[in-house]
Image (cartoon, helix red, strand yellow):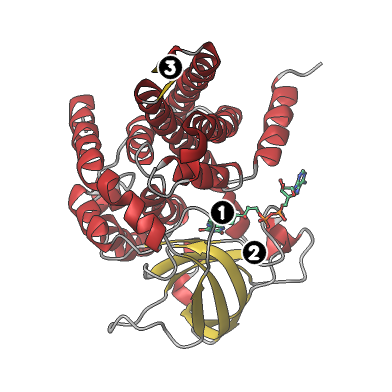
Amino acid sequence: MSSDDEKMILDTISKWAEREVRPIAMACDHEDTYPHALVEQMKELGLFGATIGADYGGLNLSASTYSSIVEEVAQHWMAPSGIFNSHLITASCIERAGTDAQKEKWLPRMATGELRGGIALTEPNAGTDLQGIRTTARLDGDHYIVNGAKTWITNSLNGGCLGLLVKTDASTTPPRAGMSMLFIETRDEEGNLRPGLTVKKMKKFGYRSIDSCELTFEDFRVPADSLIGGEEGRGFYHAVGGLELGRINIAARGAGMARGALALATRYAQERKTFGKPICEHQAVQLKLAEMATKTEAARLLVRSAARAYDTGERCDMEAGMAKYFASEAAVFCAEQAMRIFGGYSFSKEYEIERFYRDAMLLCIGEGTNEMQRIIIARQLISRNPA
Ligand SMILES: Cc1cc2nc3c(=O)[nH]c(=O)nc-3n(C[C@H](O)[C@H](O)[C@H](O)COP(=O)(O)OP(=O)(O)OC[C@H]3O[C@@H](n4cnc5c(N)ncnc54)[C@H](O)[C@@H]3O)c2cc1C
């Protein structure tokens, strides 16, 4: 696709986000209801195939365009970006590591959004330390039998498929050598959950409206040919293989949220008056706006630079980590400063800023916590600069 085509797609999605995402954000968030109509529009726009290759019906967008799309959506409401982001993480895992037959079977349906889902790594006792997962998959004839529990799995109630990280051999040292990734279709032809799987939606502080769930697998049967890549013991590498793009995408959400919070605060500061003048004319408020604007711009530049590096095929785990760390912290910073600028009204459910405050913190946790990002950045820094 030419860069002009990519620009046109970005422009279309930017207008759509302003027209369709923004107006429904507050009600969906407050009522914790899923934006079904928005999902239908996302299908039309091709968002479920944004980074999937054209051979499988996707748009094959560059990381630069894709991250700009994520930023455009997140500046209005961050949660819907998770509907296609988590889905595309699993799609990219299949595209990178799947067999030809697996790609042909699943990717075209994923690209249209007919088959939508997410990625199931985290368990009640293992998040950062992924090698500590306990969910097992035991081969029994031509099926794997899955037992265990996952938690916080986004898109697992309203979606129909998941990349599922399991242990096919719990006795290996290191544990990652016994980890595998299965692709599971969670629903049957009638749309009912398949036997052996229960899904319970979790109540959340932020990132509401989108389903994040606890999953329980009890003798859940998965066809053996759903082992991604067809080889056991590769699951950990499949899971971490998509982290660079995953982090750029969280960073883009952060840059979008920082931008959104800054826009809300700037407008409010121009309208609200104290001591006979708009509060934006008080220096204390100006200092906040200036810091927010600077961090927002820096976040956007870091996202662009990491996406550009990714697009040229360079190793960019340090750049993606820096963008993720900085942009997510910028989102938290801007949301908090905006709360202060809104004063008492920041606590009102009639204003949008409180949602930014609740949603922003997630970005510091997902796709590797910001503590881990700094460790990754430092390790890369040291290894790229040997003494
Ligand atoms: C709303 C939401 C949606 C999510 N969606 C998904 C999803 O779709 N799929 C999925 O698989 N997961 C999902 N997650 C889970 C998320 O990825 C994990 O919460 C995250 O990886 C952190 O794991 P944890 O919560 O177990 O924290 P822990 O790993 O227990 O970490 C707790 C704290 O200890 C710190 N810490 C841990 N180890 C180290 C270390 N070695 N050095 C320094 N500090 C350390 C962490 O940084 C953190 O501050 C979601 C989470 C939320 C809240």
Q: Is residue 13 left or right of residue 215?
A: left
- Give the spatial CA distance, label 1 vs label 2: 10 Å
What kind of element bears circle 3?
Answer: helix
Q: How many numbered marks does the figure carry? A: 3
Residue at position x 42%, y 71% from top?
Answer: 157
**Mark 2 vs mark 3: in front:** 3
Q: Are marks 1 and 2 in contact (CB under 8 Å)?
A: yes
**Mark 1 vs mark 2: in front:** 1
What kind of element bears circle 2?
Answer: strand
Residue at position x 34%, y 34% from top?
Answer: 62
Q: Is residue 169 above or below residue 16?
A: below
Residue at position x 72%, y 65% from top?
Answer: 125
Badge 1 or badge 3: first in the primary sequence: 1
- Give the spatial CA distance, label 2 vs label 3: 55 Å
Amino acid bearing label 3: Cys
Q: Are marks 2 and 3 in contact (CB under 8 Å)?
A: no
Question: Residue 243 at what x, y percent from top left?
Answer: 54, 44
Q: Is residue 320 above or below residue 349?
A: above
Q: What residue does disc 1 label?
A: 239
Residue at position x 22%, y 60% from top?
Answer: 37
Instruction: Work out which quarter of the rendered image holds the N terminus and state it.
Output: top left
How packed mark 3 is, by other alpha carbons closer than 10 Å (few <14, some 14-19, many 20 or more), is: many
Amino acid bearing label 1: Ala
**Mark 1 vs mark 3: in front:** 3
Q: What residue does disc 2 label?
A: 179
What kind of element bears circle 1?
Answer: helix
Q: Residue furthest right?
A: 387
Q: Is residue 206 left or right of residue 2?
A: right
For residue 378, which quarter of the picture? top right
Q: What residue does disc 3 label?
A: 280
